[in-house]
Image (cartoon, rainbow, N blue to C red):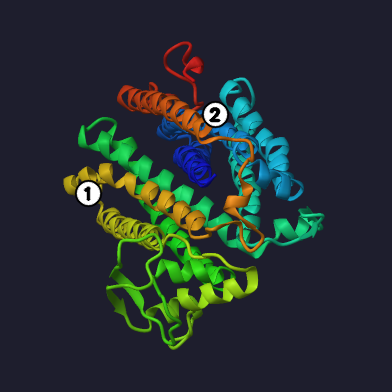
């Protein structure tokens, strides 16, 4: 059974990480594409419409792959995690149902109208559809994150006959955890989309193709990226303080802080014995007082240590090991913060070039913009892994251990078969998605449109 638990965790992590490669792109792209179309609607500059249609295709591709891969997540609750589903179904199912029946329908319906309504409905209504689709994608994210936040910090429930039952849907939707998780995730998605558009624009500027148009896009994305990245990191800071209060073990593991410290230093680089749950660090470089300041807003604030928190959890929940895998939690946190820091530095460089009017001619910046597209993805994925793995061994913090959520009848062979099938299918899907994206980028924007948004060539309206 232990191997089934670990295999099922691996399967859920693999499929969810893959799914989450595309979701932030579609969320961020939707709002930015809507902004591009708004710029065209207000200025009648045809370049903004060309950008709208060009990046709209990449947005739609990411949306399609995200939908297909997202369906698998819900199937796994029944296939691999029936114990979890039975225990929390009446709570966890509510936000997922609302997300599917309301938010997702809003997003998909108005995206469909936006695609097929081009030149068939008025310009104002057509613009409204993409904004409504962007709203639907954000609303969908809110309900998903409300469900996940309940797993991090359960509220509005009571346990009846060994099952968690909802007592207040409103408390679940207004969970303090989701108030930080939602803006942190969605604004981070906008930063991700800004880097992708900036990187693609840099590719065109290097090749001197549609330079004037893509210079506009690059300048806009530097500004959007600076604001979104800075906001994401600031909200993440406050989210970390909330996490220190709600899940102190996760913060202690993120810093490899084994003993309660007052004040506590921020760990820059630590080495520990190679074990799942080491009892100490053998080498640690810290910045004095910094963790206290970040976690408690106090220069000499107290931060609980792993050993003391483990003892307190044993006294509260009974015998067991309540530590996450320290090495994974420690390094995913640093990869997330490190990628975010590089994003800010790169964008500040870009902002300086925009101010000097040299962004389109700076070869080093343009060349580095291509690999820099990976930075938001690294930050997003490692941030998600930190959030979920740092909660272990709980699947619902303080209520249900992960090992108790597994389906009782599933075997290791069953999980291995599904892991292999999912990996092969997702691998093929990934190759196709990358190939289509590269094809869209190489083909380039549609032919120039006039001030009314109509194409020079006939039948341009079927370009989608």
Of marks 1 and 2, the one in the foreground: 2
- Residue 131: horizontal and vertical position, in percent? 60, 40
Residue 118's tag is none
Determine whether, in the image, residue 224 is placed left or right of residue 415: left
Where 314 sits versus 46, above or below?
A: below
Residue for badge 2:
68
Q: Would residue 115 be visible to someone looking at this image?
A: yes
Determine whether, in the image, residue 115 is placed left or right of residue 55: right
Residue 356 image-quadrant placement:
bottom left
The residue at 50%/64% (across/down) is 235
Q: Earlier in the sequence, mark 1 or mark 2?
A: 2
Residue at the far top in the pictured view = 458
Where 428 sits versus 208, above or below?
A: above
Secondary structure type for disc 1:
helix
Residue 365's tag is 1
- Residue 288: horizontal and vertical position, in percent? 33, 83
The residue at 64%/62% (across/down) is 153
- Residue 4: horizontal and vertical position, in percent? 52, 41
In the rendered view of the protein, which quadrant contains the N terminus? top right
The residue at 38%/84% (across/down) is 289
Q: Would residue 220 be visible to someone looking at this image?
A: no
Where 167 sits versus 112, above or below?
A: below
Residue 352 or 109: which is nearer the viewer? Answer: 109
The residue at 63%/43% (across/down) is 140
Residues at marks 1 and 2, CA–CA distance in whole angstroms? 35 Å
Residue 287 image-quadrant placement:
bottom left
- Residue 186: horizontal and vertical position, in percent? 53, 51
């Amino acid at each position: 059974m232990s191997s089934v638990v670990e295999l099922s965790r691996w399967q859920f992590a693999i499929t969810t990480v893959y799914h989450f490669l595309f979701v932030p792109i579609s969320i961020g792209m939707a709002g930015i594409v809507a902004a591009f179309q708004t710029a065209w609607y207000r200025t009648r500059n045809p370049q903004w419409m060309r950008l709208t249609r060009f990046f709209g295709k990449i947005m739609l591709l990411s949306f399609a792959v995200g939908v297909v891969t997202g369906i698998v997540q819900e199937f796994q609750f029944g296939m691999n995690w029936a114990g979890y589903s039975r225990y929390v179904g009446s709570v966890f199912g509510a936000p997922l149902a609302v997300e599917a029946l309301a938010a997702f329908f809003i997003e998909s319906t108005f995206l469909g109208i936006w695609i097929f309504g081009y030149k068939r409905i008025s310009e104002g209504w057509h613009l409204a559809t993409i904004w409504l689709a962007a709203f639907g994608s954000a609303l969908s994210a809110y309900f998903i994150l409300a469900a996940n936040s309940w797993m991090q910090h359960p509220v509005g429930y009571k346990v009846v006959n060994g099952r968690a039952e909802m007592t207040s849907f409103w408390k679940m939707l207004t969970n303090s955890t989701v108030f930080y998780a939602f803006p942190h995730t969605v604004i981070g998605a906008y930063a991700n989309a800004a880097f992708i558009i900036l990187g693609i624009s840099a590719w065109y500027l290097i090749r001197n193709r549609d330079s004037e148009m893509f210079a506009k896009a690059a300048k806009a994305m530097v500004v959007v990226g600076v604001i979104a990245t800075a906001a994401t990191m600031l909200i993440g800071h406050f989210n970390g303080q909330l996490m220190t209060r709600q899940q102190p073990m996760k913060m202690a593991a993120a810093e490899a802080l084994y003993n309660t410290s007052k004040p506590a230093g921020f760990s820059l680089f630590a080495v520990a014995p190679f074990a799942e749950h080491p009892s100490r660090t053998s080498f640690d470089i810290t910045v004095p007082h910094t963790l206290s300041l970040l976690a408690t807003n106090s220069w000499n604030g107290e931060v609980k240590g792993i050993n003391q928190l483990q003892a307190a959890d044993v006294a509260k929940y009974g015998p067991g090991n309540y530590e996450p895998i320290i090495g994974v939690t420690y390094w995913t946190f640093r990869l997330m913060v490190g990628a975010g820091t590089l994003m800010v530095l790169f964008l500040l460089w870009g902002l300086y070039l925009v101010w000097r009017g040299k962004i389109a001619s700076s070869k080093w910046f343009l060349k580095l913009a291509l690999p820099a597209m990976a930075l938001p993805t690294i930050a997003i994925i490692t941030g998600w892994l930190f959030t979920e793995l740092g909660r272990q061994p709980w699947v619902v913090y303080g209520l249900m251990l992960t090992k108790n959520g597994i389906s009782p009848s599933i075997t290791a062979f069953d999980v291995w078969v599904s892991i292999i099938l999912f990996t092969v299918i997702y691998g093929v899907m990934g190759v196709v998605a990358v190939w289509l994206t590269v094809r869209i980028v190489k083909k380039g924007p549609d032919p120039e449109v006039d001030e009314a948004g109509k194409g020079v060539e006939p039948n341009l309206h079927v370009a989608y």
